[in-house]
Image (cartoon, rainbow, N blue to C red):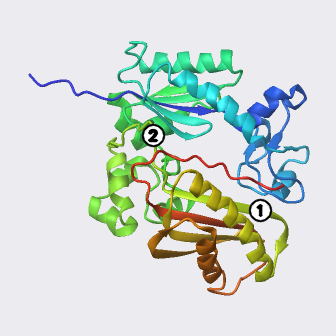
Amino acid sequence: MSETPTYRKIIHIDMDAFYASVEQMDNPELRGKPVAVGGSENRGVVSAASYEARKFGVRSAISGVLAKKYCPDIIFVRPRFDRYKEISSKIHKIFHEYTDLVEPLSLDEAYLDVTKNKKGNPSASLLAQEIRQRILDEVGLTASAGISINKFVAKIASDYNKPNGQKTVNPDEVEAFLEDLPIRKFYGVGKVTTEKMYQLGIFTGTDLKSKSLEFLEKHFGKSGAFYYHVVRGIHNSEVKSSRITKSVAAEHTFDVNLSSEIFMMQQLERIAVSLEKRLQRHNISGKTITLKIKYSDFSQQTRSKTLPYFISDKSLIMENVEELLYQEKMKDSVRLLGISLSNLNNEEKKAVVVQLKFTF
């Protein structure tokens, strides 16, 4: 007699338009109106948009200028990250009443492994429903949830019935669910990869499943094996309650575009000071230094260098940043500069959550 396979029970909770919803909750005058957190009608980038704004095509990461063009009645609100962190802490406190296996992805979303949970409830779907109701009752915001046997499917499912909904994909439904799914809905398949898959005749999960491992590795490198397995419902990544930081960064968006390397060096000095403080606060150093450049046309470039030793000191950071800055000529004026350190010496350190500041 064969044993029934044991599956994990994973919930992915995703708050609905979190930043914008917090602003609408705190300011009744914003309720029911198109709201953009961050940006302005002159410059800056939208961090989040309310569902009323999304109907017009306003999304996070688009420029404020474009948001105003899409939705002339858009209301721009400055972000209040301290408030978002405060609300997020309340939500995560609720999560931990159900399980200690909580893996935060950001302030507004997290994975919960409820295979064994503190409530002794065998139904992950009922637990998700109860958690969402508690968030609404105790915090005043709506959340959506996806429930399945692994993180990959749960993440996709949480987007299925947004806002304020949930979807469960049972073990015997996973493969059919993924086969019917448009490839652009697969978590981890971005715009560029989607276009490449379209060119290869891959439009749905069924199309992806028809390709051999060799074919996918040939066209997508190491990611090929990932695509091969996830479309078959195989994703063994565990929910980890502490995530190791892979990089620490600081960046700044300027009110006026910079066209002189001298002015850029002055700004990079300020950014390096912020980065040094973050690194020293958590006793972290890194070997790989990356300079991030965003031009006035919103195109982005990174320049990196790996050292044979760990650094965290501002002077050493700047010494290498200067070399990267003058590595090649700027192709246009610059609206954003950033510095990050990766390849860190923190294999056994806890995660460091760094919320970058935005200038509007």
The residue at the point 34 percent across, 51 percent down is 209
Q: Which residue is mark 2?
A: 242
Please state which amino acid type lies under the numbered disc 2: Ser
Q: Position of residue 192 (x, y in %)?
A: 54, 63
Quadrant in the picture for the N terminus = top left
In the rendered structure, the answer to whether residue 120 lies left or right of residue 76 reads: left
Q: Position of residue 337 (x, y in %)?
A: 71, 68
Q: Could you say which disc has been placed on residue 6 in the image?
A: none
The residue at the point 62 percent across, 61 percent down is 276
**Above or below for 106 versus 146:** below
Please state which amino acid type lies under the numbered disc 1: Thr
N-term-proximal mark, 2 vs 1: 2
Secondary structure state at the residue bearing disc 2: loop
Quadrant in the picture for the C terminus = bottom right
Task: Looking at this view, name the residue that lies furthest to the left.
Answer: 1
The residue at the point 79 percent across, 26 percent down is 25
Can you see residue 312?
A: yes
Between 346 and 343, the one lying in front of the other is 346
The residue at the point 69 percent across, 63 percent down is 273
Q: Could you say which disc has been placed on residue 253 in the image?
A: 1
In the rendered structure, the answer to whether residue 71 lies left or right of residue 116 reads: right
In the rendered structure, the answer to whether residue 259 lies left or right of residue 158 reads: right
